[in-house]
Each structure stands twice: as C-alpha cells, then as structure tokens.
Amino acid sequence: MEEINEELEKSKVFYSTKGEITDACILGYEVKTNGFHGGDAGHGSYLEITFTNEASVAMDVAMPNTAGVYEVASIDSPESVTIKMRGDAEIRTMVIALRRMSEFLEKVLRPTGQRK
C-alpha cells in the first residue's frame, strides 16, 4: 500500500510542495513555481519538478537531440531528476501535459476488467 507524505510551503518568492511515496521503493518528489509573470522565460516565471531516489527506485534518464540521437549517454539510476520549464506558456502546457498523462495512466493501469 502506498503512503503519501506531503507538505506545502508558501513564501514570498515561490510556492512548493514536496513529499515521499512509499511502496516497494521510496520516491521523493518536489514541485516549485514562482507563478505566472506575464510572458516568456525572460519575465522570470518557472516550474520545477524533481523526482528523488530515496530508496530502491529504478529509473533511467535519456536525453535525445531533435534527430533522436543521444548526445548525452543515458544515466542509469540517478539520485534525482529535475525538469525546469521557464515562461508562462511553458508552465501552462506542462500542467496540461502532466494532467493528461496522469489521466491516461489512471485509465490503463487499472486492474484487468475495470478498464473503461
């Protein structure tokens, strides 16, 4: 059974939440944002998402270029992975993408016979 610990911090500079999910492994996560700043990356808005290997998390990171060629070798079992989006449109599209991915996974990972 998974266990979720979460805390929310609000400061004058940014909003953040972090926690751990415990199963057969322990995955740490943190989200930080300073909200919308009315424009592109030059206006200063950002959204940062981090996943941390707290215990026994099997994960890989790969970063292909636009041609699909891996310029940086895949990283096996990193301690953490951070993705940072900069700009209002980038934040909005990331939030939508994360929501859609979550909805998809909730649908396809249901036990057999419960899929709609």
Image: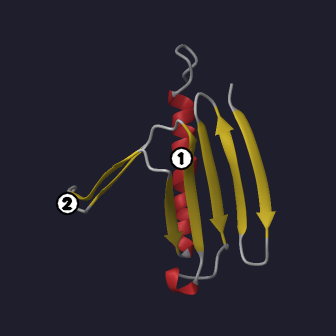
**Spatial separation of the CA atoms under disc 1 and disc 2:** 26 Å
- The amino acid type, in three-letter code, at marker 1 is Arg
- The amino acid type, in three-letter code, at marker 2 is Ala
Q: State which quarter of the image contains the C terminus.
A: top right
Residue furthest to the bottom in view is: 42
The colour scheme is secondary structure
Do tag 1 and tag 2 residues touch (Cβ < 8 Å)? Answer: no
x then y, percent, for residue 111: 56, 18
Q: Element at badge 1? A: helix
Is residue 50 positioned above or below 20 on the image?
below
Is residue 76 positioned above or below 70 on the image?
above
Q: Nearer the viewer, residue 4 or 111?
A: 4
- Please state if 79 lies on the left or on the right of 95 as rendered: left
x 53%, y 35%: residue: 56
Q: Element at badge 2? A: loop
Q: Nearer the viewer, residue 75 or 1?
A: 75
The residue to which callout 2 is attached is: 67
Could you say which disc has been placed on residue 100 in the image? 1
Q: Nearer the viewer, residue 40 or 51?
A: 51
**CA neighbours of label 2 inside 10 A, class few (<14), some (14 to 19), many (20+):** few
